[in-house]
Image (tube, rainbow, N blue to C red):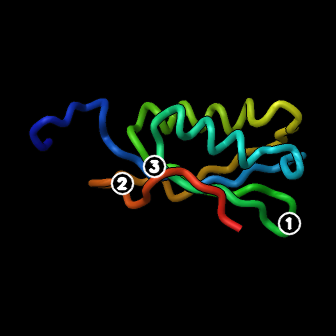
Amino acid sequence: MSEGESAGSKLLSVDFEIYGHVQGVCFRMYTEKEGLQLGLVGWVKNTHSGTVVGQVQGPADKVAEMKVWLSKEGSPSSRITRASFTNERSIDKLELSGFGTRF
């Protein structure tokens, strides 16, 4: 471990895809807000198949919190039926900056 790095500050990157009634319900806006609130970086976008996809990066514990939010909570009027998380990996440094919506 490098200097100034504790076990809890391991950085993770994970891709997500959220299924259910998640488009047209401000899901992207809320995801952005939640990510920023947790101090994460990443992006989110709607797909043509009606899902929402994206990627989050940050401290492992915050990424874990975000995964719970994405799979259980979402935006107020969304109805999440399934959340899929893939490509989870450790990263040395953040590869993205800020949290944005892609189109």
| Structural crowding at the residue carrying mark 3, measured as other residues with C-alpha within 10 Å and reported as few (<14), some (14–19) or many (≥20) | many
- Amino acid at the residue labelled 2: Leu
**Which SS class for mark 2?**
loop
In this rendering, is residue 55 above or below 9?
below
User: Residue at 25% of width from left, 32% of height from top?
Assistant: 7
* Corner quadrant of residue 97: bottom left
Percent coordinates x, y for residue 34 in the rendering:
61, 35
- Amino acid at the residue labelled 3: Gln
User: Residue at 54% of width from left, 51% of height from top?
Assistant: 99
Left/right of residue 7 with respect to residue 70 in the rendered view: left
What count of labels does the image hold? 3
Q: Earlier in the sequence, mark 2 or mark 1?
A: 1
In what quadrant of the picture does the C terminus appear? bottom right
**Which SS class for mark 1?**
loop
Q: How far is the residue under mark 2 from the one under mark 1? A: 29 Å
- For label 1, the residue is 49
- Amino acid at the residue labelled 1: Ser
| Structural crowding at the residue carrying mark 1, measured as other residues with C-alpha within 10 Å and reported as few (<14), some (14–19) or many (≥20) | few
Percent coordinates x, y for residue 15 in the rendering:
57, 56
- For label 3, the residue is 57
Q: Earlier in the sequence, mark 2 or mark 3?
A: 3
